[in-house]
Amino acid sequence: MGKQKKFVEAITAMDVDFAQWYTDIVKKAELVDYSSVKGCMIIRPYGYSIWENIQKHLDQKFKETGHENVYMPMFIPESLLQKEKDHVEGFAPEVAWVTHGGNEELAERLCVRPTSETLFCDHYAKIIQSYNDLPKKYNQWCSVVRWEKTTRPFLRTTEFLWQEGHTAHATAEESEKETIDMLNIYADFCENVLAIPVIKGQKTEKEKFAGAKATYTIESLMHDGKALQSGTSHNFGDNFSKAFNIQYTDKNGQLQYVHQTSWGMTTRLIGAIIMVHGDDSGLKLPPKIAPIQVMIVPIAQHKEGVIEKAMELKDRISKVARVDIDTSDKMPGWKFNEYEMKGIPVRLEVGPKDIENNQVVLVRRDTREKIFVSMEELETKIAELLEDIQKSMYEHALKHREENTYSAKTLDEFKDIAENKPGFIKAMWCGDRACEEKLKEVAGVTSRCIPFEQETISDKCVCCGGEAKHMVYWGKAY
Amino acid sequence: MGKQKKFVEAITAMDVDFAQWYTDIVKKAELVDYSSVKGCMIIRPYGYSIWENIQKHLDQKFKETGHENVYMPMFIPESLLQKEKDHVEGFAPEVAWVTHGGNEELAERLCVRPTSETLFCDHYAKIIQSYNDLPKKYNQWCSVVRWEKTTRPFLRTTEFLWQEGHTAHATAEESEKETIDMLNIYADFCENVLAIPVIKGQKTEKEKFAGAKATYTIESLMHDGKALQSGTSHNFGDNFSKAFNIQYTDKNGQLQYVHQTSWGMTTRLIGAIIMVHGDDSGLKLPPKIAPIQVMIVPIAQHKEGVIEKAMELKDRISKVARVDIDTSDKMPGWKFNEYEMKGIPVRLEVGPKDIENNQVVLVRRDTREKIFVSMEELETKIAELLEDIQKSMYEHALKHREENTYSAKTLDEFKDIAENKPGFIKAMWCGDRACEEKLKEVAGVTSRCIPFEQETISDKCVCCGGEAKHMVYWGKAY
């Protein structure tokens, strides 16, 4: 690799400055560009094709589980936003307001949706009459706006893309089941498609969604030891249905309030992919989400038969993988670096000598291992290799998380870890908001979740020494 | 059909009140619902699944022809919108303005995008440097906002969904070719997928897009004789690249301005499907775009073996068509009407007698013809039938357009047709804007396009009697 190093000098090493490394990657891998609109990003073709793959996987899962896509207006009248008290308190301070249409001032301000619970509720109140109309399981793909002071591409932007599921059910049991089912779909997607291990759990009262009875979350750990909330699923119970009067007639002719959920995943998942898998040569994409899985780089391509052979291989590989070829007149070294930066899982090199030896060279992006493969075995080996890369990227990320997850029994231990060892801290909690706030104050961490898989670290709250109620994951978060 | 008529009474006959008929269909086929936001519609699952099919077809075509998807911010700073003079004049009067973010007033107003030329230009100016960077062929799927006074679902709403392609090329020839290529993709899509015949042509100076050198259009004719602009493709030449300073270094090291295009299709296509194909029983969907192509209605389903047989048929049909089944306890008559209202191309009836006779009944939505098919031939016959329906719906629409297209040589003839015969009027035009305006004033029509396929109706302008330059399609339009 010595000779090629010069091409990648421009990217900051992650251990030197993780934030700058992140910014370098999103720019150099051509995922985003900054726009003239403060806090808004342009998602470029390569970044958008990753999002399209995320959409494809999730949308299929949503449909398989009986959800239907719809489209709600992007505007919410101020009076509608105000119907659920906690919800408006949570969102009103960070919305964008439309005050003029054409040349006229509007009689009522409209906010650009920060999330669409109020619109779905307004619609559900109209279309739900009887138990026959339930459940309603809707989803929409759209963009939302939250007025942020400091922004970073994918992680926190004024406008971002997401999907928001909104469902209505006859009973509390059904809405609870839906909330958990969707969390499980999110977790499976992260682990099996994005190769990102997640902790499933419940948010504390302090951290839950504005208007929810319970918020469930999946939390992942980035390379720098910070946590990222990667997907959330909320059970509203009848909070919203009472505020919006969404009632149905049950089988006994009685009026009942519906029980609702909402759940969402966003473009911040692309930030997670970068920060979990990336290295100092750039992005590393798990094969299942990579827009291009195999990039063919012909060697000494001016020599007779090289490009022809490379094109022939491309045709063959296209039957088992998403493959592309670079026949531009740039140097192979430049191409190697470019496609490492873009995180393409496998590079295939083929030149005159390889053709003579009836073989090609495959180079793994994750381990940089070089593998010589005979032409005959190409399709089989590539399919196997992609599977192996997917698996080993997950294991690599899991190992990193395990190595950076700590337990603390005392407040001193807790503070020491928080200060010196970036990662998750597992510690017991009494359930008191005061302790949660104190840990934030003295150690700079927030509760990430009360994991479904509980452990007993001790029987006392790490903060006040009172009786422990839950084991909680704590951490600094994006 | 006699007995079932009572179920469809609620829909207004199209000949009685076409506008009301349209509104009835969009509501009763559950395509849209009105929202609390003036002028904005909710696209319900059935309507949205039609849009998803439109997206799937077009997106595939765009990608096959080398276009890449991106995502631009939904906001445009006022100063950016103002960079191209004609463009801002065309759009500024009809945009929504964001003036506050959170609790603060913005230093500069942001408009919610009515279209994104200015954002793409701003981005292209940054990323295009050399001839190596060209062409850039981008597209985005998003929603846009235009502040409309009077709105109708799909046809004219304050917010609507669309795709907008934006490309940059090295030469004027290339941008002209792209503009026409995309118009052809739109025309093929309308004719082959939506079964809607279109007239391809160029817009007059008066009717072209704000900022374009040339606008091309496809125009279709609705059942009531009104025209619908169904897709447009604009060649900007270097109008925008000069305003935004988008230059590249050519092979000789000279700085050159790029040549640009944009093109779009919107959810109004769903309005076209309704108004071209629908009838007094509801929607009629061309098979290629129908979310469900075959609906199975079991007859006497309480009898032994009926539902089992129907489910077995569903499995078999699912290999050749998008199929669903209704086993609810509603009456078959109710189901027939419901799926006619929803425009499902084929209804399959199967009951105890059919099973005994080893046959099923297929009913075409377009002609209401009943066809008895033996169980063995089911897959073949359904595939053939769907193809035949697709073809005959196109022919039916083409015949309607031909029967409602008139020629006028004199102004009196022209006025008479415009007043008494809803449809297209073909007439010669001198090319003078004054004549175009006069025809609008005296006959209430606008120029729809100067068709690529010219005919000579006479050698004089139908309005002023001066020398004719073009044959033009005129009409009243949505």
Image (cartoon, coloured by chain):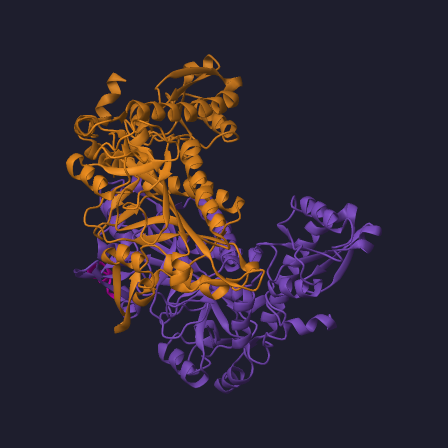
Chain colours: A orange, B purple
Estimate the x, y position of residue B390 in percent, counting from the top left: 63, 57
Q: Residue furthest front?
A: A467
Residue at the image position 21 percent from the left and 27 percent from the top: A410
* In magenta stretch: residue B379: no
A251 and A146: which is toward the camera: A251
Range covered by the magenta-colored residues: B78-85
Residue drawn at 39 percent across, 41 percent down = A49
B294 with respect to A264 (left or right)? right
- Position of residue A471 measured from the top left corner of the image (x, y, whole percent): 32, 33
Give the percent coordinates (x, y) of residue B6. 67, 74
- Whether residue A235 is visible: yes
Q: Give the quarter of the image for residue A194.
A: top left
B117 vs B343, nearest the viewer? B343
Residue B212 visible to an observer of this rendering: no
Q: For the N terminus of chain B, which image quadrant?
A: bottom right
Q: Decide: is B26 above or below A394.
A: below
Q: Quadrant of residue A228?
A: top left
Magenta segment's dominant SS is helix
Q: Nearer the viewer, residue B181 or B397?
A: B397
Q: Nearer the viewer, residue B304 or B213?
A: B304
Image coordinates for residue A143, horizontal then vertical, percent: 35, 52
Q: Is residue B84 magenta?
A: yes
Q: Is residue A170 above or below residue A425?
A: below
